[in-house]
């Protein structure tokens, strides 16, 4: 029995260890960025565009999405909402929703962009649950369509970028090579 287990372990190492070695440096970063571009880039771009609706920036809709209790308190009159801290928070959130996904997809400052997006997803989740009444759900409950399960998958993709970087097919790699070659 131990011999069979050793053979299986050796087979696994030769098949998948070689695959990992051949793809190290490009596969994880590239695939994480492609997954992000396919799934989350349209989501965040569409969400960011809703914050630009209206005749002022930030719009009443942006306040309603990011700090709904403040928007309600001031009857959605953006001119009446104090600049500090509320306009700063909404402007920063809106800019982050535009800039961070683009950095990730391009692979430019990808680790920093992914780390920022992890923070953004955490704040977004807290706002969705506390201010918009979304149900968080629970981990290990067999219901993968719950908010917490989806956000954990998003964070996993971003965490791969934080740990492994954007890979060889990225602007980070090109700029890093130029800096080394000087």
Image: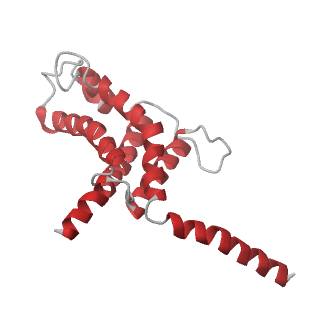
Depth order, front residue of 100/118: 100
| Relative image position of residue 101 (x, y in whole percent) | 34, 42
Q: Residue furthest top?
A: 55
Q: Position of residue 129 (x, y in %)?
A: 44, 37
Q: Indicate the quadrant where residue 15 lies.
A: bottom right
Q: Is residue 175 above or below residue 74?
A: below
Q: Where does residue 62 sit, x and y in percent of width and height? A: 27, 27
Q: Quadrant of the C terminus?
A: bottom left
Q: Quadrant of residue 132?
A: top left
Q: Nearer the viewer, residue 130 or 160?
A: 160
Q: Residue at x 37, y 27 (%)?
A: 46
User: Split into 4 quadrants, where in the image is the N terminus?
Assistant: bottom right
Q: Is residue 127 above or below residue 115?
A: above
Note whether 181 is above or below 1 in the view shown.
above
In terms of depth relative to the viewer, which is nearer, 77 or 150? 150
146 horizontally vs 131: left or right: right
Q: Nearer the viewer, residue 58 or 33?
A: 33
Q: Does residue 149 appear to the left or right of 66 in the view shown? A: right
Q: Residue at x 13, y 22 (%)?
A: 80
Which residue sits at x=17%, y=33%?
87
Image coordinates of residue 147 in percent, x first then y, are 52, 39
User: In which quarter of the view is residue 127 placed?
Assistant: top left
* Structure colour scheme: secondary structure
Q: Which residue, as the protein is rendered here, is positioned at the far front?
A: 181
Residue found farthest to the bottom: 3
Tally of numbered discs: 0
At 41% across and 32% down in the image, what residue appears? 42
């Amino acid at each position: 029995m131990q011999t069979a287990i050793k053979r299986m372990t050796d087979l696994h190492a030769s098949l998948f260890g070689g695959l990992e070695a051949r793809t190290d440096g490009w596969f994880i970063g590239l695939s994480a960025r492609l997954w992000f571009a396919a799934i989350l880039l349209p989501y965040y771009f569409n969400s960011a565009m809703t914050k630009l609706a209206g005749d002022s920036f930030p719009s009443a809709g942006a306040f309603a999405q990011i700090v709904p209790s403040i928007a309600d308190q001031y009857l959605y009159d953006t001119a009446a909402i104090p600049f500090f801290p509320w306009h700063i928070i909404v402007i920063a959130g809106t800019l982050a929703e535009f800039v961070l996904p683009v950095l990730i997809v391009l692979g430019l400052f990808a680790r920093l962009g992914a780390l920022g997006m992890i923070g953004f997803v955490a704040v977004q989740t807290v706002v969705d649950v506390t201010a918009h009444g979304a149900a968080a759900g629970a981990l290990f409950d067999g219901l993968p369509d719950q908010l917490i399960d989806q956000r954990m998958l998003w964070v996993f993709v971003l965490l791969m970028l934080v740990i492994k970087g954007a890979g060889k097919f990225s602007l980070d790699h090109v700029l890093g090579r130029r800096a080394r070659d000087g």
